[in-house]
Amino acid sequence: MTLTHDPLNPLTPLTRPARLRPGARVAVVAPSGPVVDERLDAGLDILRGWDLDPVVMPHVRGRHPEFRYLASGDEDRARDFQEAWCDPGIDAVLCARGGYGAQRMVDLLDWTAIRAAGPKVFVGYSDATVLHEAFAVRMGLATLYGPLVSAATFLKDDDTQRHLRTTLFEPEAAMVIGAGTAGPLIPGRARGVTLGGCLALLASDLATPFARASARGGLLLIEDVGEDDYRIDRLLTQLLRSGWLDCVAGVALGSWEECGPYERVRAVLYERLAGLGVPVVEHFGFGHCATSLTMPLGVPALLDADAGTLTLEVPALA
């Protein structure tokens, strides 16, 4: 197996795909859970309003006959993803929703063919974390940890839509990222290459084929949903004990929806992360929250915890 990015070395900037242009064809895939048809249709209408041409892959509206938490079988979901990426007429691949299931299909993909197809825009969050990591390690590709096409946040929130649209079409206008709520959990500034996603998925991805061996030199972006404080403790402790967080440059904390009272969550985050001795910014406004920023992964940036900002050194897309 060929690795484009060496996981044993400090993080380096990844290849950025080209920005989208009006009229671009974008494939919508469901690598994880099943969609609600009405929500998907509403999301497709938003994309069409941006002068994009969304292509819904064949099994997106499906459902596994036995495991109803999956959008059709593993092979079908992988085939949809593979065909979308390898279609030369497709400029971007967008996830319809999260849930669970990407881990079941990611190793069914033909990564030699995906590399041969070249870089494209990939957008998704939550369960898509495993795919972001796979693209980074297997292809050396920068990706976007951003809204899901059928998610309520994308459908209802203008700011979420606006930030994704700007990142896709005019990325030079979205180089300073920050929520008005963001502030220092641990003050300071740090430079590094962005990586991360959903905390539970990062922890469960450890020691799997092609998984990144370390966050060394990186700016780690993490968030989660529906995890009690002790579970967040366990997930962070696993990353700490494995050495995965050794020499991380800085941390940005997104949303912790349905994780219990934030003061309890905050206490765990502080106690587990303070020992790293790096800047940590909280309330950054990405992930499972009402307004969700689009976060580029694989891009060099400056994290300023005191100002509550992440300033990209290059646009997210070329």
Image (spheres, helix red, strand yellow):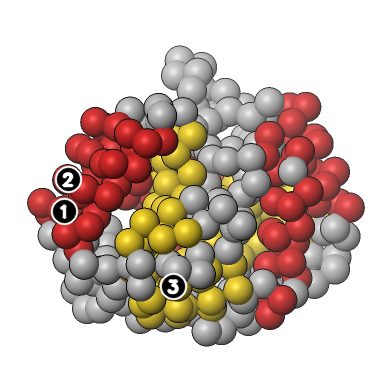
127 sits to left or right of 239:
right
* Residue to which mark 2 is pinned: 237
**Residue 198, visible in the rendered structure:** yes
Which residue is painted at 23% across and 39% down in the image? 233
45 sits to left or right of 214:
right
The answer to whether marks 2 and 1 mark residues whose Cβ atoms lie closer than 8 Å is yes
Tag 1 secondary structure = helix
Q: Give the mark nearer the N terminus: 1 vs 3.
A: 1
Which residue is painted at 47% across and 59% down in the image? 183
Give the percent coordinates (x, y) of residue 273: 24, 55
Q: Give the mark nearer the N terminus: 2 vs 3.
A: 2
* Front residue of 117 and 308: 308
Tag 3 secondary structure = strand
* Of labels 2 and 3, the one closer to you: 3
Q: In this rendering, is residue 289 above or below 65?
A: below
* Residue to which mark 3 is pinned: 303
225 sits to left or right of 204:
right
Give the percent coordinates (x, y) of residue 160: 70, 51
* Residue to which mark 1 is pinned: 240
